[in-house]
Amino acid sequence: MISAAEAHRIGRALESVAPWAAEIIVVLNEEVTDGTEEIARRHGAKVFREPWRGFVAQKNSALQKATQPWVLGLDADEVVTPELRDQIMAAVLREIKTDSPAAYEFSRLSFYCGRWIRHGDWYPDRKTLLWQRDRAKFGGVDPHAALLVEGEVGRLRGDLLHYTSETINHQIAKTVQYADVFAKNCEREKRRATFLDLLVRPPWRFVRGYFFRLGFLDGWQGFAIAWLTAFYTFLRYVRVREDELRKTHPP
């Protein structure tokens, strides 16, 4: 696990794994002073303080500190259910064969504005978060770290509970932050945003999530998720256009 100031919720995440995990590794941002470290240590975690270097580098740092043959990646706002725990233990304890999966994926079920979201772009939201330590590492583009697996990826039953954005304002703030990171990555990769991106991508994300993936079955929360996802998509590409404009027409 990597963590920032998460004293208000990291305990719930650690409680879901502490009774059966052989070790718990937490890489904590060095400036955190809210009591997160003390809570993690009470649950038996080994805590390492490090400066923030981005999601990909930070997760790889935590992975390098793990000593067990199997690793479970967990965030401070996630909880392992008993069903998923049993599935994980069975997979890990199963005799290792040459054709055994190198990693496993499972569904993540998000709690949003008082409701579990079971449709749309947010479910089943399968994540590969259990893997053999020596057969995977993190890659991708910040803030979306992706596990790069050498070998087959199997699938487990059971949900990982995700207590996502605590308020709409928190979700919008994350949207702005992620859009800025996306723009910087596009600049580094020399990727441009066209008017077609602005015109087509946002409405398509709404239609796909709300209608094709049945987001309307999740009430007003499903409607809000579809709209905010479309807004986030628009914001990402308009930020890229803004940066391009600044280069061609500096103030």
Image (spheres, grey):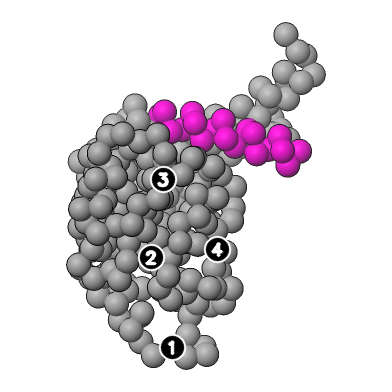
Q: Of the numbered discs in the image, which one, if any, rests on residue 137?
A: 4
Q: Position of residue 22 (x, y in %)?
A: 30, 71
- In the rendered structure, find residue 49 and report the number of the disc placed on it: 3
Towards the viewer: 152 or 53: 53
SS at mark 3? Answer: strand
The tag earlier along the polypeptide, 1 or 2, is 2
Q: Quick check: marks 4 and 2 in contact, CB under 8 Å? A: no
Q: Farthest right residue?
A: 248
Q: Crowding at label 1, few (<14), some or many (≥20) Cα neighbours within 10 Å?
A: few
How far separated are the C-alphas under marks 2 and 3? 20 Å
Amino acid type at circle 2 is Leu
- CA gap, disc 1 and disc 2: 17 Å
| Badge 4 or badge 1: first in the primary sequence | 1
Nearer-N-terminus badge (2/3): 3
What residue sits right under mark 1 in the picture?
A: 96
Earlier residue among tags 1 and 3: 3
| 14 relative to 52 in the view: left or right | left
Give the CA distance from mark 1 to mark 3. Answer: 34 Å
Residue at image position (30%, 81%) is 90
Q: Earlier in the sequence, mark 3 or mark 4?
A: 3
- 191 above or below 160? above
Q: Marks 4 and 2, how far apart in space? A: 12 Å
Classify the position of the N terminus by image quarter: bottom left
Region rendered in magenta: 172-191
